[in-house]
Image (cartoon, helix red, strand yellow):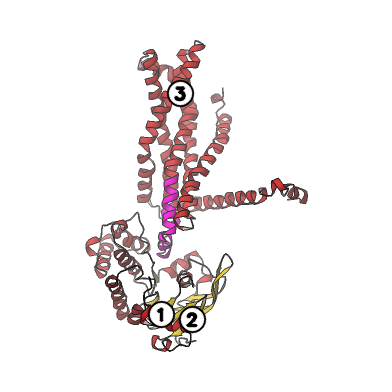
Amino acid sequence: MRAADKGALQTPQGEQILPLLNAFLEFMGNLGLFALRAARRAFLPPFELNMICRQIGEVGWSSLPIVVSSGLAVGLVLTLHTRSTLVRFGAESMIPTVQSLAFFNEIGPLVAALLVAGRVGAGIGAELGGMRVNEEIDAVEVLSVDSFKLLVIPRIIACILALPILTVFIDVAGIAGGFLAERSASHISLHLYLNRAFSMVGWATFIPPTLKTAVFGFIIALVSSWFGYNAVDGSVGVGRAATNSVVVSSLLIILTDVVLVKAIFFLFPGTAI
Amino acid sequence: MNDVPTVPDVAFDKVSKTFDGRPVLNDVSFSIAPEEALCIMGRSGTGKSVTLKLMVGLLKPDAGSIRIHDRDILKLDEDGLSQTRRLIGFLFQSGALFSPFSLNDNLALPLQRLTKKSKEEIDALVQTQLDEVGLGNDRYKMPSELSGGMQKRAGLARALILQPSILLADEPTSGLDGVTAREIDDLLLKLKEKGKTTMVIVTHDIRGVRRVGDRLAVLDQGRVIALGKLQELQEDENPLVRALVSEDCRNEH
C-alpha cells in the first residue's frame, strides 16, 4: 500500500478502517485456505459415507418442513401482492407465470438457502464449536483420526447435495401456495394455473438457478464449519460461532447470488429478458 | 533435577510455551522412563494440561524439543505425527467422548480407521475393553446418557483401545466422588501392574499419586520446581511442594 493511501485510511474517521480491513482480509484468507483444505481432502479416502448420509438426513430431511411451509407461505403472499398490481393493468392471467418465474429464478433458491443458513448453519457452528471447546475434536485427533475429514467434509458434501433438492421442494410449495391464493380469488382450475405457470418456464429457467444453490450449500457448510471448528472461549465462543455462521453465510449467499445471476445471464442469454 | 538413565519414552528439553505473550511453560526439562508413572501436580494455570497437549502434538512449543520414543515430534510431518499418536492414549479431563457416537462407536472408531481387524474382532475388542472399565452393559449408550464417572471410565477405555505404550491422563479423578475416584485409580493401578505402559498423570489428588505414581513433578509458574519420589518431596524445602504433597490439601476440587 502506498504511503498516501495508508494515510488516508488513518484519518480520524478512518482510524478503524485499517484494522477492520485487516481482519476482513485475514478472515477471507483463512476461509480460502479452509476451502482449499476441504477440496484437497474431499477426494482422499476414507470417504466417510456413514457421516455423509447422517448429515444429508440432518441437512435435507430435517429442513424439509420449514422449507416447504415457508415456500407455501411465500407463494401465497407473493400472489396476493402481485394480484393487486397486475389486476390494475388487466394482466391477471399473468399471475401464475410471474409466480413461477419469480420462484424458479430467484425466490426459491434464495429463500431456501437463507432458511438453511439459519437452521443448518447455526447448527453446524454450534455443534462443531461445542465439540471444539469440549475437546472432542482434540480427542479425535489424538486417536490419529482426521477430524477435518470426519466432521467438515461430510457436512460440506451434504449441504451441496441437499440444497438443490430442497430448492425443488420450495419451488413446488411456492407454486402450490400461489395456486391456493389465486384459486380463492378467481376460482382458476389447477390445470389452467399450471399451464400458465409453466408457459414460459424452460430448462434454462429451472436448472441453472436450482444448481446454483449447490454453491450456496458449499458456502453455508464452509463458513459454519470454519466458525465452529475454530471456536474458542467456551460456551461464549460456541454462541459466537453459531451467530457468526448464520450472519456471514447469509451475507455471502446474497453477495454470491449477484455474481451467479450475472453468470447465468451470460451463459444462458435466453433467461435474461 | 533427577534424570532417567535409560532411553526415555518421553523427554522434554528446555520447552517453553506462551499464550498471548503470557509464559505458561518456561524452560521445562524432564524425562520419563519406559513403564514409569509420572504424576504432575501444581496450582491451577501452571501449565500441567498444556504439558500433556505438547506431548501429543496438539500444541507446539515456542522453544525446546519434545521426544517421544526418541523421536522429536516437532520434526515429524503429519503422517509421522499420526504414527506417533498411535503409541499414545489420552484421557481428557472431561472424557471428551465424541458426542454424536455411541460408546461402542467411540471405541470402534480408531480400530476401524487404523487397523485391519474384522468387524467381529473389533466388536470383541470393544466389549473386552468396556468390560475392563465396568461399562460392558452400557455399550450402546450415548455419551450424554453417562454420568461423569462413567464418561471418565469410557474415556479411559477409548484411550487404551489401541493398546498404547504411553498413557496421558489429564485429571482423571477431578470432579468425582471419593469412591468413583478410587475406581479410576484402581484402573490405572491395574494398568500399571500389567506393565508395558508409561503413564503421565496430571492430578490434584495426592492419594492417587501415592497409589499410582512412581515419581512426582511439581509445576509452578511454568517451571518444574520439584521432581522426584513422593517421599523425597515431602521433605522439600519449597513450602508449596510440601503443601501439595501433604495429605491435608488433597483434592481441592
Q: Label the magenta part by its dominant secondary structure.
A: helix
Placement of the C terminus of chain A among the 4 image quadrants: top right
At which x and y percent is residue A106? 50, 29
The quarter holding residue B207 reads bottom left
Whether residue A199 is visible:
no
Whether residue B156 is visible:
yes
Please state the chain letter of the residue tagged with numbered disc 1 in the rendered image: B
- Residue at horizontal 46 percent and vertical 50 percent from the top: A239
- Residue at horizontal 43 percent and vertical 33 percent from the top: A167
For residue B224, which numbered disc appears in the image?
none
Q: Could you tell me if the residues under marks 1 and 3 are in contact, i.e. CB atoms within 8 Å?
A: no
Mark 2, secondary structure of its residue: strand
Residue pushed farthest left? B137
Q: Which residues are magenta?
A: A122-151
Which amino acid type corresponds to the residue marked 1 in the rendered image?
Leu
Task: State the separation of the CA atoms marked 1 and 3.
Answer: 70 Å
Q: Could you tell me if the residues under marks 1 and 2 are in contact, i.e. CB atoms within 8 Å?
A: yes
State left or right for residue A120 relative to residue B125. right
For residue A78, which numbered disc appears in the image?
3
Question: Would you name the residue on which mark 2 appears?
Answer: B30
The tally of labels here is 3
Question: Would you name the residue on which mark 1 appears?
Answer: B38
State left or right for residue A153 relative to residue B18. left
* Residue B39, placed above or below residue A238: below
* Residue B62, placed above or below residue A114: below
Q: Are marks 2 and 3 on the same chain?
A: no
**Residue B196 on the magenta segment:** no
